[in-house]
Amino acid sequence: KSWYFSRAAMRLLHATVAAGITPFQEIPVAEYFPPLKNFTPAPASEFVSKAQIPRFTKITQEQFEELSRSGQPFVVDDCVTEHPLMGKSCDDFGKLFPNGKMKANYGDQIIKLSEKTWSTKARMAKGEKQHLSKGVKIADPYVWHVKDEETRATKSAVQRHWGVPYFLNTTLVNNKEVSESFEMWFAISGGGAMAHSDSYTLQTVSAQFSGSKKWRLMMFPDLQTVFESFNEFDRGVYEVNRWAPEYEFEVGPGQCVIFPPAYMHETFADPKDNPSCSASTTFQYVGPFPSRYLRNFLSRFTNSHLASTSYGMMLWGPYATIEAKSPKCTTDTALIAKRARNKMGQLDGDKDGGVTEAELEQFFLSKKGEWGQKVPQTSEEWFKGMKPEGKKQVNREMAKYRAGDVLAWHDLDRDGKITLVELEKTFTQWNVLLTRHNELKAIRKQKKDKKVIEKTKSLEEKYATKYRCGSEGGEQCPLIDSIKSKKGKSYKSIRWFLNDGEL
């Protein structure tokens, strides 16, 4: 566990990068994530499991919060060992919840949990050589969307058998989110999911009740321009030959894996370890938010489905601008600097030149900052149904989480306070990337393929020249050469990003 405690080295790394950060710059994956320090990406066909995913028993709140804000994937070995559904088989779920209605993961067919043969009848899906199964046809899993596709009566019946992991049961807001956002997964022996990136904008927990699953994870690829966009859902990463896993590990009964938005993953219920159907659950939690992770890799994420189809930019804006509604984006450096000075004046209560977590919490508990007490849009439904005292408690907890999350976003050198210089850098990053994002989305209005390609090339070249390749094209830049070379076949990648493709 020494990777977690070497904070001095991490602060030095962040301080070095912070000194010269530009809007498109990020700490490289192998330097940002300590377990990947000596990791060299390789295609799935050449993958050798070397990087060890961090595993914890009796994880502390300090560890949990640090891992969450940094977006480090990790496993908790005693995650759901005390859960009421622990050890339940697929058939047990059918007996407990006979009215439940689930779907085949790769289809729309409705299957009742009470049906007798579903847990033994495999529906084989197309094989894939890059998958953990090494090309063998795999059984399509079932997913039971209890959270949003079941009746209130059925969902309540499941909630009466529900439990919240100990490290998520310390706040009411996480207790409620975990208890409202869950879905169940049932994997037939030899079943699994192809590599994909989820559309969730919060941290995801996948916990195993019975059986086991092998996992492979990979950080979302570095998409330098929209021309590199691809179908990020099932199999898409295989098709563009970008699947280069970092971790391979197993999650067994009582254990769970936790990973941040966009982190790509595939699973396999190896028949050698799973002679029968296995059951697991997936859910999200609200705090802490993976703000440090999102800010560091913001450049690549603005080319992802999180930005184009999952309202990521809307969700991230309040963390990046420390405003309820992001001000109109600009690339005017003088205006950005003015906004940073004004924000420092508002937050730096003791006027010592540094904004601390305590000062941020005080701001979010005040009238001016009370917007920071709100739950995410995805959590509003359960929040509305709470009693006044419960709402007040959730608001206080959100203010505390928001303070730590905002500090993690803007504290580039990780010294525990936000300075004016840091705020100017993070404000500049957000404004430049959001301006580019909005200009790209505006191209959606173009009807002709050729115009879309030419306008996109011109836009990407402009930003590469100004922010990535030296001032006004003064240096040779392979990125610009790559952009200029794009032709008709690049249209599909652009349309994936513009959400006008085969989504």
Image: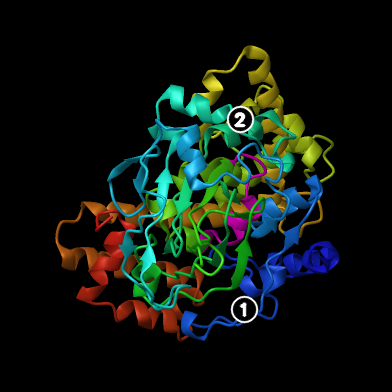
Q: Is residue 31 above or below residue 164?
A: below
Would you identify the image quadrant in which residue 218 lies? bottom right
- Asked if residue 36 is among those painted magenta in the image, a careful observer would answer no
Q: Is residue 136 above or below residue 148?
A: below
Q: Is residue 162 above or below residue 249?
A: above
What is the three-letter code of the residue carrying label 2?
Lys
Mark found first going from the N terminus, 1 or 2: 1
> How many residues crowd around disc 1 within 10 Å: few (fewer than 14), some, or many (20 or more)?
few
Q: Is residue 331 visible?
A: no
What's the magenta region?
Answer: 285-299
Residue 261 percent across, percent down from the top left: 53, 53
Which coloring applies here?
rainbow
Look at discs 1 and 2 and give the one toward the viewer. Answer: 1
Identify the residue at horizontal 60%, vertical 50% (top origin). Answer: 207
**Gap between marks 1 and 2 measured at Cα:** 37 Å
Residue 251 percent across, percent down from the top left: 62, 60
Identify the residue at horizontal 44%, vertical 52% (top origin). Answer: 306
What residue would you read off at disc 2?
176
Q: Is residue 9 above or below residue 121?
A: below
What is the three-letter code of the residue carrying label 1?
Ser
What residue would you read off at disc 1?
49
Using the image as rendered, state which of residue 497 and residue 82 is in the foreground: 82
Which quadrant holds the C terminus? bottom left
In the rendered view, does 32 fall on the left or right side of 379? right
Q: Secondary structure at mark 1?
A: loop
Outermost residue toward the front?
116
Q: Secondary structure at mark 2?
A: helix
